[in-house]
Amino acid sequence: MVARTLAAALVLAVAAPATAGLADRAGATFALMADDFIAAFQPREGVVVHVNGDSIYLDLGADAVQVGQEFTIFRKGDVFTHPFTGKPLGRYEDVLGYGQVKLVRPRFSEARFIPAPGKPRPVPEDGARITKGRIRTAVTPVLDLTGSAADLRRVPYLIAGALERSKRFQVVDPIIVRDTLTSASVRVAEVLARPDRASRAATDLDVVGWVVPILIERRGITYLDVTWVSAVTGTALFSRRRPLVPAGTIEEQRFPWEPRAED
């Protein structure tokens, strides 16, 4: 998948030399915020200690979690054993739903519980987990609110590459993401504003979350804003924003055969 992503990015780089600069700056800017996304998905496991309506409380505090994280809430079942030796190998697990962290205290955290269809509600001693496996993710095309005429098709590939290199994310080919959104008549803005449409499109791609890059301009400064949207609820859980890195910095880092960093 990474090879396909890099190949497609190179094709776009050659196809649009006159508008590569802004895309490169956006990609380099995301590289500076990528660690924040990686940190939000470090493997974690805890226990539900209290339930109050739609809120659940976890025994994970400020040293382990942050606002915007999404945990799988599960209940351990019977032990299963090796058929020949009879040795216990593990437990069955029943996924009850998901907990989206909304408040963090030194010794505990509060999360909004989203139930899985037909499953019982959680009780104290149920488990909460961010998986150790790679997080399957989709990066949308850039939502450009600056009015620029720049060709930004390379940006999702640059973001995907940064996430893949972390070994925490498995990113769907941006071409497949774009085609899926187009066939479902879902605009990038709707991934942010229409939770129902975001969730349905995520189901088609079999991903757990969206990464939505946005370019905005404030007082003459262009920013890259990147938002993580839950595939479970279509809710924007957290975002990061940085001014675009200067064009001269990117120019110095480029290979001679690549297009100049100009728009």
Image: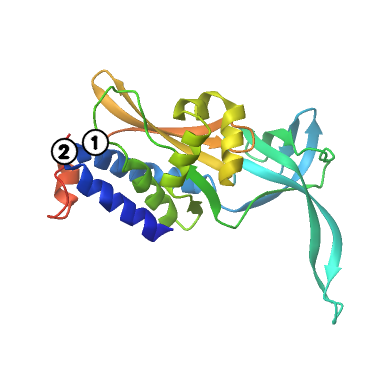
**Residue 235 seen by the camera:** no
Judge the density around disc 1: few (<14), some (14-19), many (≥20) Cα neighbours within 10 Å: many
The amino acid type, in three-letter code, at marker 2 is Ala
Residue sitting farthest toward the top? 219
| x and y, in percent, of residue 190 in the image | 50, 26
Quadrant where the N terminus sits is: bottom left
Q: Which residue is drawn at 85% across and 40% down?
A: 120
Quadrant in the rendering for residue 27: top left
**Residue 188 seen by the camera:** yes
| x and y, in percent, of residue 12 in the image | 27, 46
Work out whether residue 131 or residue 208 is closer to the camera in this orientation and state it.
208
Q: Name the residue under label 2.
A: 18
Work out whether residue 120 or residue 102 is closer to the camera in this orientation and state it.
120
User: In the image, which disc is placed on residue 158?
Assistant: none
Q: Residue at x 74, y 35 (%)?
A: 56
Work out whether residue 202 or residue 91 is closer to the camera in this orientation and state it.
202
Quadrant where the C terminus sits is: top left
Quadrant in the rendering for residue 93: bottom right
Q: Name the residue under label 1.
A: 22
The amino acid type, in three-letter code, at marker 1 is Leu
| x and y, in percent, of residue 32 in the image | 34, 44
Judge the density around disc 2: few (<14), some (14-19), many (≥20) Cα neighbours within 10 Å: some
